[in-house]
Amino acid sequence: MNAHEMDRLETERRDPRAPELDLMHTLDILRYMNEADRSVPDRVGEKLADIAAAVDAIVNAIRGGGRLFYVGAGTSGRLGLLDAYECPPTFGTPPELVQAVMAGGAGMLQADESAEDRAEDGAAELQARQLTARDVVVGIAASGRTPFVIGAMRYARQVGAATVAVSCVRGSAIGELADIAIEVPVGPEVVTGSTRLKAGTAQKLVLNMLSTAAMIRLGKVFGNLMVDMQPTNSKLMRRAERIVEMATGASPDTAVRTLRQTGGDVKAAIVMLLGSVRDAGRASDLLRLADGNVREALRLAASVPDEPKVRPEATRP
């Protein structure tokens, strides 16, 4: 990309409101940054219909046995990594369900910024992960024209996977390759060209919506409670107990006791308490039949209630 092409990109333009940013006092810099950041949620809000379409595509893919792939480079790639890494502890998903594909590799302590220029690497990464038509690929690029992401999107289209583009410019190159284009033009950055700022915030908000709304639709949330969490430490165990209390109205002691019976399975504990299910194994079976959906498991529990335990004396003539 030459200098003239960069000047045309919204993410590379200079903000005329603070041309002497380096001469401003600290508090003035922060006020300016805060004011700039306030515009981002509104710009994202203008794209809710596109985001909803992307959520539905992700839900359909996962329900059909597919996976979600985030593909990006630099800040965009790291935001994809963050969202993918947070899904297992938050929603109890297997690690392979939501994957991040990062230019230069995900395990690097320092970014290899040159890796984003190789379109063939984006395609190769998805090929190595055996991308299929059942999967969905979300390409993330603030400029909308990162070669690594473009290569991945082209390969996804070739395979027949659903494609979503998340960018911060209108008429983006990755948007033209996608089934659904989420383009959030946030305008010039506080520091010209540093797309980890407003553009990064916009992308983070969009990714939050994609994964969270999809997991809600997939039954990973009960009411507004995070019920598919994995209580792997003492803080998370306390949170699991509190969630069971809020979901069922049970006392703290009852919540703790029931979670012990289910081996820390929050959803099974809720089904036991709200569905009058005495056995943790049956609660797990009901959830399995309900594809992990608590409300459906409770409906099944109500339709086939537990057999009452018969006291020995009740069987005597």
Image: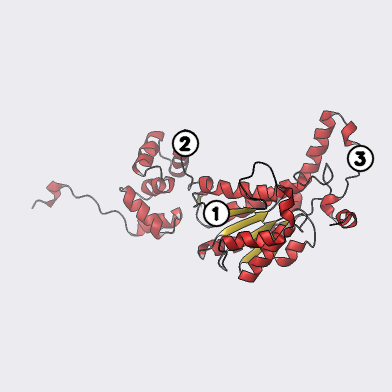
Mark-to-mark CA distance, 3 and 1: 43 Å
Task: Compare marks 2 and 3 and give the one earlier in the sequence.
Answer: 3
The residue pinned by badge 3 equals 19
Mark-to-mark CA distance, 1 and 2: 23 Å
Residues packed near mark 1 inside 10 Å, few (<14), some (14 to 19) or many (20 plus)? many
How did the renderer colour the structure? secondary structure
Mark 3 or 1, which is nearer the eye? 3
Instruction: Residue 308: give its label.
Output: none
Task: Compare marks 1 and 2 and give the one earlier in the sequence.
Answer: 1
Residue 150 in picture, x, y percent from top left:
72, 62
> Which amino acid is tagged 3?
Pro
The residue pinned by badge 2 equals 233
Element type where label 2 sits in the image: loop
The residue pinned by badge 1 equals 215
Residue 45 visible, this angle? no
Mark-to-mark CA distance, 2 and 3: 48 Å
Task: Compare marks 3 and 1 and give the one earlier in the sequence.
Answer: 3
User: Splitting the image into 4 quarters, where does residue 159 fall?
Assistant: bottom right
